[in-house]
Amino acid sequence: MCRDLDRVAIFTHEPSRIPSSTQSVFNLKHNTNGALLFLTVVASIVGCLLFLGRPRFETAESPNFYHAHHATEYRVPLSVIKQGEKFRFTLENSRPTRDIRLMIYILNPEPGATLKAGLVTVNGVAYNDGKALIESVLVSVDRGQSWQPAKFDVPDSPYAWYQWKTHATLGRGNHEIWARATDALGRSQPVDSKIFWNPNGHEWTGVFKIEVTVIDVVLPVI
């Protein structure tokens, strides 16, 4: 895990001890002359302590072992690939995952649930990158032929989940419940969820769909 660490380009003015973490955090401070005083990097390297003392500036992504192999797990392809297609990630054919797409989830009912015929509560959460408010949440129980609005609360933070809820009347049989959200920038989820498919699943978005089975309630004979 710790080999080739001398080739990692990190910018600092003074030696810094880098603790282990699962994400990268960058903290830059400058003085009046614009000199870089320090840069603290919390690296996702388990069990390694780095002591940094010499700055180096790179014009391209580092080809060191950690970046070229482990870090490719957190990348997305530069081009659209077919669902299920095998894809070998490299620094040339992919980029680091950085975008948070507008996304929605149905939390209730659960996928594959068996429900009683009649009025069914459907609820879940939606979120985006915080750049715009989510303006609508729509739910369909007829595979997108018609949509009904769901009620939701606007959270205090632009990065928090929007909790939404609606009700639908379902008769006996197998049904698909779909959900999609739209924000103030006009962004939504495509009905064809294969558009953003990739092996790692990063930055995927699409109309959220679940299947449920609805049965009639049989009253006991008294």
Image (tube, grey):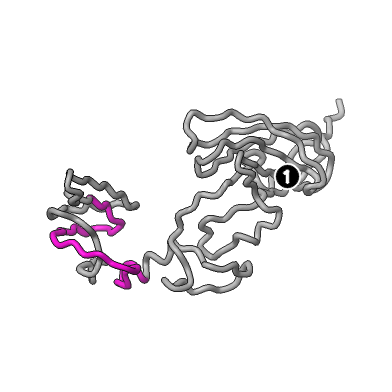
Give how far across and how far down residue 14 sits, in percent: 12, 53
Q: Is residue 62 magenta?
A: yes
Q: Quick check: 14 left or right of 155?
A: left
Q: Quick check: 163 left or right of 18?
A: right
Give how far across and how far down residue 207 sits, in percent: 67, 49
The image quadrant of residue 2 is: bottom left
Q: Quick check: 7 left or right of 137?
A: left
Q: Is residue 192 magenta?
A: no
Position above or below: 147 against 13: above
Position above or below: 173 against 80: above
Give how far across and how far down residue 161 sits, in percent: 53, 36
Q: Amino acid at mark 1?
A: Ile
Range of the magenta residues? 40-68
Q: Using the image as rendered, state which of residue 220 and residue 109 is in the foreground.
A: 109
- Residue identified by numbered label 1: 177
User: What is the quadrant of the N terminus in the image?
Assistant: bottom left
Q: Quick check: 143 left or right of 162?
A: right
Q: Main secondary structure of the magenta part?
A: loop
Q: Residue at x 22, y 51 (%)?
A: 39
Q: Residue at x 46, y 58 (%)?
A: 97
User: What is the quadrant of the C terminus in the image?
Assistant: top right
